[in-house]
Image (spheres, coloured by chain):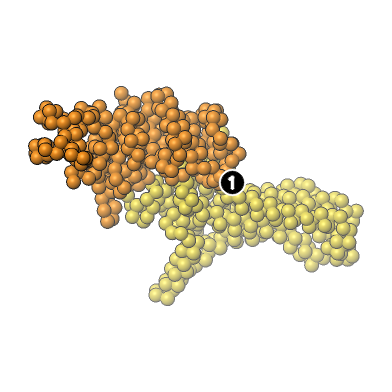
Chain colours: A orange, B yellow
Amino acid sequence: MTTLLSAQNVTKAYSDKIGIQNLSFELKAGQVLGLLGHNGAGKSTLIQSLLGAHHFQGEIRVNGCHPIHDHTEMMNHLSYISDVNVLPDWMTVKQLLKYTSGVHPSFNIAKANQTLEATDIKPNTKIKHLSKGMKVQLHLAVIIATDTKVLILDEPTLGLDLIYRETFYRHLLEWFHDGERALIIASHEVAEIEHLITDVLILKQGQCVLSESMESIEEDYFVVDAPNTHQAQIEALQPLSKQAGLGSTKWLLKSDNRSQIESMGTIYPVKLADLFLATQMGIN
Amino acid sequence: MHPSIYMLEKELLEHKIVTRLPAFIALCGFMLFVGIFFSSSAQHNLFFQMEFSGDVSDIHMEFVRDLNMLITFGPGLVSLILSMLYLPKTLRKERQEGSSMFWRSMPVSNLLTHAVKLSFGLLAIPVICSFLVLFSDLLLWIINLSSDKQLALLVEQESLIYVLTNWITFLGRMFMVALALLPFACVMLMVSQIVSSPLIVILVVIYASKWLAISLFGFYGIDQFLSEMLMLPVNILFSPSPFAALGDATTLYLVTYFAVGTLALWASLNLSRTNEVSWKSLLNR
């Protein structure tokens, strides 16, 4: 698999704080990376670095291009959708498509129009008159019509209703499976993206606290629901988190301890949301 | 078609005042034309002195010159004003309205973006305003053609060749104005990325540097340099010979002015490389 994105020791320091510190990861074609973290954990800072929107220390390559020095070339292969509308409000849909077809070498205007035909978006409508969901649909239609290799989504479905979310992810997956592509999704809706992602990168206060594939996570962690009588034994194994129930507690543990625990309670596969909470809050 | 064509079209769509103001002036001119065209008394009143005296004295020729100056310098002034409104606004507007991330997501270099914005501000706007000159001359030519009397005030507009050559001359003059404005335009693009009121900041800096140099060191060089260079586009526009206006400029000042412009363009290109715009980020490599 081709490496489409690599980040080595990426650090972004502001005058009063560290945004992200020594982040390293790689993204190959076919991978979908879930970028998770509490508010202010550094997700947006990392995304801004990947997009070349601000200066950073370390090394980032997107399809071999530096985000700042080779920005023009990089943008042939990289796209971005955020929760905030970045499309120019004063343009009509038709004008936006015409402009993009003029400046983006790989943009296929027929494909964009075809995608939009399946929506309620009319070519002569001004972007400012579109709903939030429509704006996201339009932006995705523009991206689908380009030969983008890496797509970064920053809370793309925030504020969208269920129907828009469903349509959005359907179009996204169709596009993703249509070529050698990679995807980064930053979201607070852990459960919503869990089934989409192949890898996860969890940040806390600018640092990486977990970077693994979803397959490894299933192998490396498990949840046990054990009666409270086993509390002392389980606590000795340094669980990552616990969730108290009625007479029993759910513990999140590393798989190294699985053989010692199995007889104490019911074993469940770990959910990404549990792991995320464990990395953010630890054991209470 | 080259991407710059689409980018210029986008500027035209985004900054509607560039077309609307000249269109409004043209509409006013057209209504005046209709009034004159259908009113023989208005024609008589407007061109009374010329018709009555029957000779073309110096005073009458001054009237002719004044009319033609109005046709040339009016649109020239409108063009200058529109350029001055557009250039400090264009880069800043994208950031303020939040669309800069979208424009940055297109595979377009900063250099091309700057070239397009400078071309639009210094060339496209004068070309749009030049149609006012063409339109006015054409209307006067039609009045001249339709009148059964020789209208001395419109002696120049007798020929369609004059109408076309006057338009081309205006374009040439505005091209020279654009050249004289180029360094200042680069400074405006740079400053507009850092401060929210670029024109006010530039004016304050200009006056502060002038008066500080005079009051602290008794040095008048900065005052002379700024006065000469900032008046250069205006002098080229209003001078009977734009080449003479350019030739009158001090060579050392011209070289310094263009060096400042080059430095400002470099700084502006560097500032627009990222969304992190500050003097500090200018030095980041």
Q: Position of residue B233 (x, y in %)?
A: 57, 58
Q: Is residue B175 above or below residue A110?
A: below
Q: Amino acid at mark 1?
A: Leu
Report the residue at 27% width, 35% height from top.
Answer: A272
Report the residue at 41% width, 36% height from top.
Answer: A79
Q: Quadrant of the N terminus of chain A?
A: top left
Q: Is residue B221 above or below residue B256?
A: below
| Front position in the image: A281 or B89 | A281
Q: Which residue is mark 1?
A: B12
Classed neighbour count for the residue bearing mark 1: other residues with Cα under 10 Å, few (<14), some (14–19), many (≥20): some
Output the chain of dot 1.
B
Report the residue at 90% width, 53% height from top.
Answer: B148
| Front position in the image: A42 or B2 | A42
Q: Is residue B35 left or right of residue B77?
A: right
Query: Is residue B28 something that shows in the picture?
Result: yes
| Front position in the image: A281 or A3 | A281
Query: Is residue B241 something that shows in the picture?
Result: no
Query: How many numbered marks, from 0 up?
Result: 1
User: Which element is circle 1 on?
Assistant: helix
Q: Position of residue A129 (x, y in %)?
A: 56, 44
Report the residue at 61% width, 50% height from top.
Answer: B16
User: Residue reaching furthest front?
Assistant: A247
Q: Is residue B149 left or right of residue A34?
A: right
Q: Position of residue B257 (x, y in %)?
A: 47, 58
Q: Is residue B173 left or right of residue B39?
A: left
Which quarter of the picture shows residue B13?
Answer: top right
Q: Position of residue A264 (x, y in %)?
A: 13, 31
